[in-house]
């Protein structure tokens, strides 16, 4: 009996030693496979625990190669990226088809009607002796004296009429022709009658305004150009030069400025026949011009009601309608010009005055959703459409905006359920990929 007991104890000792040896070898193998690294500096890798030589943080063990976990269906569903499907429990809405009332705020300026601008040209060549209009937007009346010129051609025409009146008063045909010549040169009936009464030719001939309004373009500076020294061989220029005691004149002195721009009028300067002297604008009809973004031109149509206010005159309002719409592209920007006609016979609007306006309009029936339901991701706009119990991103085309709503032109139907707030469904570190 004692013999069997000794054999049992010997076998038990041998088994325990083998077990301890196997466990020790497994621990040594696991220790040999485990490495330690720094969370902040992954280039630091050691085979045993310690601290990082750079930041002195404790090293952490890296994952052991060969470890794996089982991917179940539930786990795969939850780990889907946000660019494919977003699982959430949020409020949903449906696009609503309706017409929306809105308004556009505009800033602009009062200007004159370009169709009511009249030019007063010089009918004869001569020298400006006296100038009675001094600045732009100076008010003038019909029959008001604008300037006085000295013209040899006018002096000669006056002397011809006086000679006929004195030497051949019975020759009515010649006298009528001489009077008509003076009229064509710009003389009025009053000037002709006074010439016949005084029997003395005037060397300073006055030019009167045939229009009511305001003077514009008076001091326009002509573009710089190299004057030509070639004499002008025209009868009018030659006659003016000899009549004033000069020799030849140059093209720079007689021709209008290059590009058709008027020279600034000054006393003592010479003008030629046909050269514009002043321009007069009739203020009975004024324009209020506004520039708006090109995207808002679809909201405003001809006849849209406009309420114009004047920041310089609080409380003053003018009611008008849109009469003109035109897209513009200038300096790399697209915009639209909106024009409203306003009556000039009032005491508020003045040319050059800055104004504000509100244009109210009603959109055509369309699908509208809250602004928060559409997300702009840079290249396109998206909304999250409900599919079962989940939400998928769909591309949408948006139109105009009105208040807190946006018009959906394409991408959604009236019966679709979409997320009320699209921003809640976007991970800050992911990018939404819309399936085509």
Image (cartoon, helix red, strand yellow):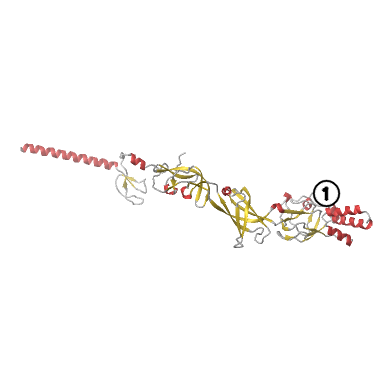
Q: Residue at x 56, y 53 (%)?
A: 103
Q: Badge 1: how crowded within 10 Å, few (<14), some, or many (20+)?
A: few
**Residue behind mark 1:** 234
* Relative side of 205 to 14, left or right: right
**Can residue 245 be seen by looking at this rendering?**
no
**Can residue 114 be seen by looking at this rendering?**
yes
Q: Residue at x 5, y 38 (%)?
A: 2
- Residue nearest the viewer, comparing 75 with 251: 75
Q: Residue at x 84, y 57 (%)?
A: 189
* Residue 78 drawn above or below residue 314: above
Q: Secondary structure at mark 1?
A: loop
* Residue 320 drawn above or below residue 66: below
Specify the quadrant that holds the N terminus: top left
Q: Position of residue 378 (x, y in %)?
A: 49, 46
- Residue nearest the viewer, comparing 348 with 335: 348
* Relative side of 400 to 338, left or right: left
- Residue nearest the viewer, comparing 233 with 44: 233
Q: Position of residue 48 (x, y in %)?
A: 29, 46
- Residue nearest the viewer, comparing 268 with 370: 370
Q: Position of residue 344 (x, y in %)?
A: 68, 58
Q: Position of residue 420 (x, y in %)?
A: 44, 48
Report how many numbered discs are placed on residues in the image.
1
């Amino acid at each position: 009996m004692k013999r069997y007991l000794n054999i049992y104890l010997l076998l038990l000792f041998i088994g325990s030693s083998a077990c301890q040896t196997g466990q020790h070898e497994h621990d040594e193998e696991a220790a040999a496979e485990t490495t330690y690294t720094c969370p902040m500096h992954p280039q630091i890798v050691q085979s045993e625990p310690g601290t990082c030589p750079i930041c002195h943080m404790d090293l952490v063990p890296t994952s052991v190669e060969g470890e794996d976990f089982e991917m179940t269906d539930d786990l795969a569903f939850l780990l889907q990226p946000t660019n494919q499907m977003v699982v959430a429990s949020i409020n949903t809405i449906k696009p609503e088809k309706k017409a929306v009332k809105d308004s556009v705020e505009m800033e602009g300026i009062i200007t004159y009607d370009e169709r009511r601008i009249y030019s007063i040209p010089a009918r004869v060549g001569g020298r400006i002796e006296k100038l009675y209009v001094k600045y732009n937007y100076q008010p003038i009346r019909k029959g008001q004296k604008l300037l006085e010129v000295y013209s040899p051609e006018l002096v000669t025409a006056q002397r011809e009429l006086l000679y006929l009146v004195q030497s051949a008063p019975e020759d009515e045909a010649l006298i009528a022709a001489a009077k008509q010549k003076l009229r064509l040169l710009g003389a009025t009936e009053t000037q002709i009658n006074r010439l016949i009464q005084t029997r003395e030719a005037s060397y300073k001939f006055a030019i009167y305004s045939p229009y009511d309004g305001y003077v514009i373009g008076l001091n326009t500076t002509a573009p710089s150009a190299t004057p030509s020294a070639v004499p002008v061989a025209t009868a009018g220029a030659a006659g003016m030069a000899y009549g004033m005691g000069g020799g030849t004149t140059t093209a720079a002195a007689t021709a209008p400025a290059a590009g058709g721009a008027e020279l600034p009028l000054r006393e003592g300067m010479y003008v030629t026949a046909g050269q514009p002297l002043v321009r007069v604008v009739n203020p009975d009809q004024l324009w209020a011009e506004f520039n708006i973004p090109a995207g808002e031109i679809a909201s405003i149509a001809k006849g849209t009601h406009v309420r114009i206010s004047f920041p310089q005159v609080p409380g003053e309002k003018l009611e008008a309608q849109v009469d003109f719409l035109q897209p513009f592209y200038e300096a790399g920007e697209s915009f639209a010009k909106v024009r409203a006609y306003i009556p000039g016979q009032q005491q508020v609007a003045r040319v050059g005055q800055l104004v504000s306006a509100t244009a109210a309009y009603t959109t055509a029936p369309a699908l509208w959703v809250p602004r928060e339901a559409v997300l702009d991701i840079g290249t396109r706009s998206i909304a999250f459409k409900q599919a079962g119990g989940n939400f998928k991103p769909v591309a949408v085309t948006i139109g105009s905006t009105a208040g807190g709503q946006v018009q959906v032109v394409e991408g959604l139907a009236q019966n679709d359920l979409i997320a009320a707030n699209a921003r809640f469904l976007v991970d800050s570190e992911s990018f939404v990929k819309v399936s085509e």
